[in-house]
Amino acid sequence: MKKSIVLLVLLIAVSILGVVMPSVPTTIVTEGINSGDVAWMLAATALVLLMTPGLAYFYGGMIDTKNIISTMLQSFIAMGVISVVWIVVGFSLAFGTSQGGFIGDPTTFFMFQNVLDGKPWSLAPTIPLVLFAFFQLKFAIITPALITGTFAERVRFKSYVIFLILFSLLIYAPLAHMTWHPDGFLFKLGVLDFAGGTVVHMSAGFAALAASIYLRDKSETKVAISPANIPFVLLGTGLLWFGWFGFNAGSALGAGPLAASAFATTNTASAAAGLAWVLFDVARGKKPSALGFCIGAVVGLVAITPAAGFVTIPSSLFIGTFAAIISNVVVHWKQKTSLEDTLDVFPCHGVGGTVGMIMTGLLANTAVNAANTTGNGLFFGDFTLFKVHMIALVIVVTFTLVGSFILLKVTDLIMPLKVTAEEKKVGSDLSQHGENLYPAA
């Protein structure tokens, strides 16, 4: 009760600070702004936000009935928490003046000062800076929400919120800065990440692996979860697939041929991956399932994300197919271990994002994107890009895995992470939120 009052007072204080900060624009920059690009990026930003409710349905349908509300709320609460954190300091840490190539200066855009009247972002010169900032916000929202599938039904809600904030500030923001800021360490190294394979999916996937290791209890017998609502999963997949066009095509940061190319590779990879997952299941003697197609389609979306604006459409067929098979194999392997990854976040996002990063190093083609100054992929005769991506792969995995493990430990010290055995038996919907999917009449 006291902690909630403190948090409420803190939120009120931040709100008051926002009023007194000198954030009213003196002049709004209009030179070079393209109305077509603005219109497309407004739509793309909304599409990316739609992915988080889509993720809520996707995860919510896979969990059992006593944990649906809690699981879905973990995605929705990220929309609130990260939106506030991003305004206060998150955008500055990700895209502020570079501090050694690893993090942004927290004062650059503190409380969104210099955003409304600021010059457009250097790599998005035809849209207002505030639009670029909010487009990037949607990526920051969904990344920690992706992790929730790994500890669905097993962590306290309040502890999750603490981890959510820490992860956003100390893992996501530095990775975004290193990868997407022109002065970022990985950007200058030559890493190509069109829409977040490294920043979003690998960070979430390897954070999920860290959580699986940290939260596992070898004394407990692993129990298979029966999905509560397959139509929820289908709905979530549809929303994710739809929103992903904003995610990938929007990362062209304008309405042009590159956006159209990314749009096409996104759809192609997802379709191929969904089919590959189902066919691989059938080849293993399983029945073709709705759940299998949905998971495969999302894996394809994950894998094409870093490569979407750098590869040809035929290449995206290969990326989607290959990623689905690899992730499917890892899902079956994980089931034989003691890792507690409830909804297979690591096999789908960690492995899928890694495959996408490697495939970008293999299949990137400068003919698709002239802004690719690193060169062609290994399959087209260049070795530099592939080498850079292998180096970056080690850096990102180490940073995310070790960093997330430390943050989980810190969160656990602040407030215990795990629910009790009794809370787990009752279910998080009731124990954490006092709500039920099917309340008694």
Image (cartoon, rainbow, N blue to C red):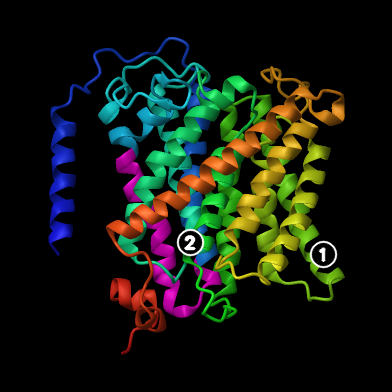
Q: Which mark is residue 214?
A: 2
Where residue 427 appears, as percent x and y from the top left, is 39, 79
Quadrant containing the C terminus is bottom left
Q: Which residues are magenta?
A: 60-85
Secondary structure predominantly adopted by residues drawn in magenta: helix
How many numbered marks appear? 2
**Inter-mark Cα distance, 1 to 2:** 31 Å
Amino acid residing under circle 2:
Tyr
Where residue 32 appears, as percent x and y from the top left, is 47, 11
Q: Are marks 1 and 2 in contact (CB under 8 Å)?
A: no
SS for callout 1: helix
SS for callout 2: helix
Quadrant hosting residue 428: bottom left
Residue indicated by mark 1: 280
Where residue 66 appears, as percent x and y from the top left, is 43, 79
For residue 254, say whether it is visible: no
Pick whichever, 246 or 78, lies toward us. Answer: 78
Q: Which residue in the rendered view is the most extreme toward the front?
A: 219
Query: Horizontal placement of 301 versus 107: left or right?
Result: right
Quadrant containing the N terminus is bottom left
